Amino acid sequence: MTSPPLLEVRELNVHHGQLQALHAVSLAVPAGGVHAMIGANGAGKSTLLRTIAGLHQPTTGSILLEGEDVTRLRPERRVAAGIAMVPEGRRLFASLTVEENLQVGLTSARKGPWNLAAVYDLFGWMRDRRAQRAGQLSGGEQQAVAIGRAIVANPRVLLLDELSLGLAPVVVRRIYDLLPRLLDSGVTVLLVEQDVSQAMKVADHVYCLLEGRITLQGRPLELTFEQIERAYFGISSSRNLPAGPPAQAETGAGGNQASGAGTWSG
Ligand SMILES: Nc1ncnc2c1ncn2[C@@H]1O[C@H](COP(=O)(O)OP(=O)(O)O)[C@@H](O)[C@H]1O
Ligand SMILES: [Mg+2]
């Protein structure tokens, strides 16, 4: 018998009111490595991570951690089971200090190699500034605190939602350079990225989400640029595009993403 995947999502349907954000999404994440979910703005990436973390209840479907069904567990119980998340936009308590924000992550923490001292060792600057209010930090520093808050819980699965959002490329690189240290400590990473080239660089396995459905998955080296473009934007003959001039809104919205996707080729 083979052991179950570390994290498994089965046929997840998730709604926000009338809107269905995820359609029968299934994935199996083995232990170890970086697994990346790419997709345009609004594809459902955050909804997926938040549902895995327990912040949304799915309409149907289930989430399993090492074969154990956690679908009905409250978020803090999922942290205790080994699922921690760095949310989109970091979501620190601006008026609390760096250390107080990190302590939030200790609330339902598991035993393991990570604690405050280990986080301070990981981010050299943080120990000296632990009494500073989080709201006074730069975006990159806040992202580091948000990562610290998640890893002090000693997760088995670390969910990272758009680490690069709003950060300068050099800061993004510094943050992604930390991934090997996290993996070495035994954490498995499932991250969400709009920047396709960034995801391709760091991931062992990539999933593409389009309008709430997984349209492509595989190892970055096995996927062609054309496959990714099609899966990311949904350009396909099976889609009934309206006759006449191309929909301006669609090409316009895609323009941004196209540059991101277009830079990925080597
Ligand atoms: N809290 C919410 N209430 C209503 N609609 C939402 C909510 N969160 C997300 N949505 C909608 O669900 C879809 C997926 O959103 P989201 O998961 O945030 O996508 P992504 O993270 O890929 O940009 C979008 O159409 C978005 O507008
Ligand atoms: Mg999002």
Image: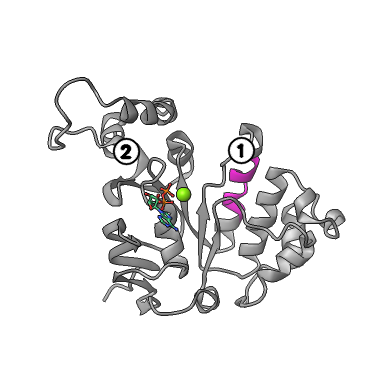
Find out if the beta carbon at label 2 lies less than 8 Å from the nearest ligand 1 atom: no
Q: Is residue 124 visible?
A: no
Q: Is residue 246 above or below residue 38?
A: above
> How far across and down, in percent of the image, does residue 119 sit?
72, 60
Find out if the beta carbon at label 1 lies less than 8 Å from the nearest ligand 2 atom: no
In the rendered structure, does residue 91 fall within the stretch colored magenta? no
In the rendered structure, does residue 177 fall within the stretch colored magenta? yes
Which quarter of the rendering shows the C terminus? top left
Q: How is the image coloured?
A: one colour
Type of amino acid at the residue the image marks with label 2: Tyr
Which quarter of the rendering shows the N terminus? bottom left
> How far across and down, in percent of the image, does residue 235 sit?
23, 32
> How far across and down, in percent of the image, does residue 131 sit?
86, 60
Q: Quadrant of residue 47?
A: bottom left
Left or right of 115? Residue 50 is left
Q: Main secondary structure of the magenta part?
A: helix
* Magenta region: 172-181
Q: Say which label, 2 or 1, has the lower sequence index.
A: 1
Q: Which residue is mark 1?
A: 173
Circle 2 packing at 10 Å, graded few (<14), some (14-19), many (20+), is many
Q: Is residue 107 above or below residue 164?
A: below
Left or right of 178? Residue 188 is left
Q: Report helix, strand or loop for mark 2.
A: helix
Question: Which residue is drawn at the image coordinates 65% and 76% (left, top)?
Answer: 107
Q: Is residue 254 above or below residue 155?
A: above
Question: Which residue is drawn at the image coordinates 33% and 65% (left, top)?
Answer: 9
Q: Which residue is mark 2?
A: 232
> How far across and down, in percent of the image, does residue 94 sit?
73, 57
Q: Quadrant of residue 223?
A: top left
